[in-house]
Image (cartoon, grey):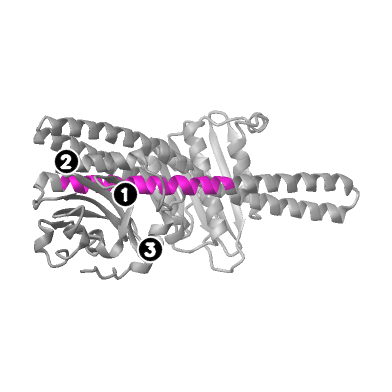
């Protein structure tokens, strides 16, 4: 009996193509998983099977020589119909769906099948991790549990493979963009020297340089995606740990010690959850979802909360923006400045308390970050290119968006960063910050970490 098509067939096939895995050579990471599946379930056949429009293709196979079979004969075509369940066929000759199947009536004469759907994060079943035997049988509870765990690791390998490929594509695009921007900048610098006496042309050159600078900053924002290389290191380390656990499972199975096998499978499951947590944490570092979904104020609150938990720094957040949504470019610039300033305050200023103020009027939005750290001599700092990289980046981001950026610092008295960005839309805004630290109109005050009396005097002017 031919299996019906899944209700999400078009989206499922599109998701499968995004992984760029069909018709690729064998890979040891997948072969290790099929070998473990065969050993644990004690079956002669184990497969990582992916189902496209017309066939079932094997990314990894043990016990069969063919690289693919027609979709209409595939047990897996039935298994992907129930994404949240494992399909177990104890005797194919007694099952009406498979009794006349050529795989049952002729070689390899399948009598038993168990397959776990490989369901992507967006909910599409690409195929299965499955085992087969030539005699009727069923799997025990521990074998079923282990097969599910191994299927999760197949998905991890697919996700890692996709992300590494996408990172390579993004890196190539970034290199091309940087080369183009460098050539354009050199060309404009040369033209500027030739037109030094022509004020109009000089202004035009500056305008073009500003446009190129904006493009460069946009490419730098994309470059943050390359932080995903952390994924290759951190999750790669977890994968090494899981590989060692697989070896321990195999040893325990050979010694017929089910309790030891279950112990190592549980440890492997914990490493899997750590991998998922690593992926989610990396996504937040690249661009917090709150910035796009809930706005700047919510994104800053979440960032300050994470900083307090991770670093122990006390942050007082005073804001009157509320749920008002700023233009996307303006919100991004203000978030990155706050992120960079807070990082500098903790890493270089060794600040224990930081106060952040955010407010908007009809014409502009202001951001002020003051820390109680050890401070620095701005003249000396600005003369050190490497130490000044973060300050230059903040200033370039603000100026490219048409805003103003200032920084005041004094040794042993802390640092204050002030940013103002223009707003094109007219909207009633709150009162300004006051020099003596009086409360802002309709302000919201949020404190992260242990409250310190010093906060009362850190109020930004």
Provide residue 222's location: percent of width, then percent of height.
55, 49
Q: Which residue is mark 2?
A: 40
Measure the alpha-carbon separation of dots 3 and 2: 31 Å
Secondary structure beneath disc 2?
helix
Binning the other alpha carbons within 10 Å of mark 3 as few (below 14), some (14 to 19) or many (20 upward) gives some
User: Between tags 2 and 1, which lies in front?
Assistant: 2
Measure the alpha-carbon separation of dots 1 and 3: 16 Å
Binning the other alpha carbons within 10 Å of mark 1 as few (below 14), some (14 to 19) or many (20 upward) gives some
Farthest residue in the right direction? 197
Image quadrant in which you'd find residue 51: bottom left
Between 136 and 334, the one lying in front of the other is 136
Secondary structure beneath disc 1?
helix
Left or right of residue 458, residue 202 in this image: right
- State whether residue 198 appears in this view: yes
Q: Quadrant of the N terminus?
A: bottom left
Q: Which residue is mark 3?
A: 13
Most prominent secondary structure in the magenta stretch? helix
Image quadrant in which you'd find residue 2: bottom left
Farthest residue in the front direction? 106
Q: Mark 2 vs mark 1: which is more N-terminal?
A: 2
Between 301 and 26, the one lying in front of the other is 26
Q: Which residue is mark 1?
A: 155
Residue 34 is labelled as none
Question: Looking at the picture, does residue 261 appear above or below residue 14?
Answer: above
- Per the rendered image, the range of residues in magenta is 145-172
Binning the other alpha carbons within 10 Å of mark 2 as few (below 14), some (14 to 19) or many (20 upward) gives many
Q: Is 458 inside the magenta-drawn segment?
A: no
Question: Looking at the picture, does residue 366 appear above or below residue 253?
Answer: below
Provide residue 48's location: percent of width, then percent of height.
29, 49
């Amino acid at each position: 009996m031919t299996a019906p098509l899944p209700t999400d067939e078009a989206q499922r096939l599109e998701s499968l193509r995004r992984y760029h895995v069909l018709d690729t050579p064998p890979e040891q990471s997948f072969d290790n998983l099929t070998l473990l599946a065969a050993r644990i379930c004690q079956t002669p056949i184990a497969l990582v099977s992916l189902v496209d429009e017309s066939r079932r293709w094997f990314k990894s196979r043990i016990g069969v020589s063919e690289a693919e079979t027609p979709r209409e004969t595939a047990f897996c075509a039935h298994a992907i119909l129930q994404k949240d369940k494992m399909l177990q066929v104890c005797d194919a000759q007694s099952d009406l769906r498979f009794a006349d199947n050529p795989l049952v009536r002729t070689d390899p004469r399948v009598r038993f099948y168990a397959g776990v759907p490989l369901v992507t994060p967006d909910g599409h079943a690409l195929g299965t991790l499955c085992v087969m035997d030539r005699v009727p049988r069923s799997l025990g509870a521990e074998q079923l549990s282990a097969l599910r765990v191994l299927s999760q690791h197949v998905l991890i390998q697919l996700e890692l493979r996709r992300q590494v490929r996408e990172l390579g594509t993004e890196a190539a695009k970034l290199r091309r963009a940087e080369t183009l921007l460098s050539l354009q900048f050199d060309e404009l610098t040369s033209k500027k020297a030739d037109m030094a006496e022509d004020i109009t042309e000089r202004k035009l050159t500056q305008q073009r340089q500003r446009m190129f600078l904006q493009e460069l900053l946009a490419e730098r924002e994309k470059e943050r995606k390359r932080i995903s290389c952390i994924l290759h290191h951190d999750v790669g380390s977890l994968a090494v740990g899981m590989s060692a656990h697989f070896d321990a499972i195999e040893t325990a199975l050979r010694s017929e010690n089910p309790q030891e096998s279950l112990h190592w499978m549980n440890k492997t499951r914990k490493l899997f959850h750590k991998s998922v947590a690593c992926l989610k944490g990396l996504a937040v570092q690249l661009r917090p979802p709150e910035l796009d979904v809930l706005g700047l104020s919510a994104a800053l609150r979440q960032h300050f909360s994470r900083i307090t938990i991770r670093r122990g720094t006390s942050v007082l957040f005073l804001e009157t923006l509320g749920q008002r949504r700023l233009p996307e470019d303006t919100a991004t610039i203000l978030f990155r400045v706050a992120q960079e300033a807070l990082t500098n305050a903790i890493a270089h200023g060794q600040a224990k308390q930081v106060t952040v103020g955010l407010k908007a009027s009809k014409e502009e939005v202001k951001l002020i970050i003051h820390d109680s750290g050890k401070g620095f001599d701005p003249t000396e700092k600005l003369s050190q290119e490497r130490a000044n990289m973060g300050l230059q980046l903040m200033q370039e981001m603000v100026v490219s968006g048409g805003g103003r950026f200032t920084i005041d610092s004094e040794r042993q008295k802390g640092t204050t960063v002030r940013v103002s960005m223009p707003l094109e839309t007219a909207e009633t805004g709150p009162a300004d910050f006051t020099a003596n630290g009086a409360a802002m109109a309709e302000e919201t005050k949020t404190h992260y970490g242990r409250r310190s009396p010093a906060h009362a005097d850190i109020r930004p002017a």
